[in-house]
Amino acid sequence: MDKTCASAAEALSGIPFDGMKLAVGGFGLCGIPEDLIKALRDSGVKDLTVASNNAGTDGIGLGQLLETRQIKKMISSYVGENAEFMRQYLSGELELEFAPQGTLAERMRAGGAGIPGFYTKTGVGTVIAEGKEHKDFGGETFILEEGIFADLALVKAWKGDAHGNLVYRKTARNFNPNAATCGRICIAEVEEIVPVGSLDPDQIHTPGIFVNKLVLSHAEKKIENRTTRAA
């Protein structure tokens, strides 16, 4: 039952393949599995489809995979703060599927629950709805969105035990719990590995049954935008 690995590279060993689909937790630079992303970059895998709220910033987080041209398509809500993302998208080098944040979270959750699709009002009458099935419920129009089923989920947690039970901290929870469930394989990067049995069962956000491997994070926490005021 011990799912811990000595390094991110060991955790990913034998898993990545060209053209795979990933679900990655995080919001901006908050709660991103940075060590796992670096190890994925170093694996040389390419033509990736990545479902994640955004693509980090230039050179940080998923931004590293953009710089090395390893991402073919992003399924994202927000694409700001990353000049390379913008450049590749506008030049036609990168495919982009926009998904409103709530819809993206629900698409991951649905995939984790084995639900292939669901209807939502979000996006009706916008470019988000183009090409999607429309259906009326109670006199209102909804569009069909598909659940996300990923080959691999990469998530970041605050604490985890050797069985893979995870606890997230505050806003770093963001998309991580939903991403964790929708991957065929889930690897978690955690700030602290604690003894089995030390986590309060009522406080566990992702049960270990969803997690295949666990690795201790050595990434330095970064601030996306630092704002200061004069003394």
Image: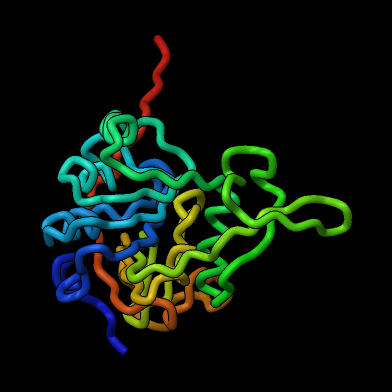
Task: Classify residue 93 as left or right of residue 109.
Answer: left
Task: Choose between 150 and 186: the one closer to the eye.
Answer: 150
Identify the residue at horizontal 48%, vertical 56% (top origin).
175
Task: Classify residue 156 as left or right of residue 100.
Answer: left
Task: Classify residue 122 as left or right of residue 224.
Answer: right
Percent of width and height locating residue 35: 22, 56
- Say above or below: 80 vs 40: above
**Among the 4 quarters of the image, the one containing residue 185:** bottom left
**Among the 4 quarters of the image, the one containing residue 119:** bottom right
Task: Classify residue 43 as left or right of residue 99.
Answer: left
Identify the residue at horizontal 82%, vertical 59% (top origin).
137
Q: Residue furthest right?
A: 138
Q: Residue furthest bottom?
A: 1
Identify the residue at horizontal 27%, vertical 35% (top origin).
88
Identify the residue at horizontal 30%, vertical 42% (top origin).
94
Percent of width and height locating residue 138: 88, 57
- Say above or below: 61 vs 112: above
Task: Choose between 178 and 96: the one closer to the eye.
Answer: 96
Q: Residue furthest front?
A: 131
Q: Is the image coloured rainbow, by chain, by secondary structure, or in one colour?
A: rainbow
Task: Choose between 35 and 18: the one closer to the eye.
Answer: 18
Task: Choose between 125 and 227: the one closer to the eye.
Answer: 125
Please identify the quadrant where the N terminus is shown: bottom left
Percent of width and height locating residue 19: 25, 63
Percent of width and height locating residue 106: 58, 60
Please identify the quadrant where the C terminus is shown: top left
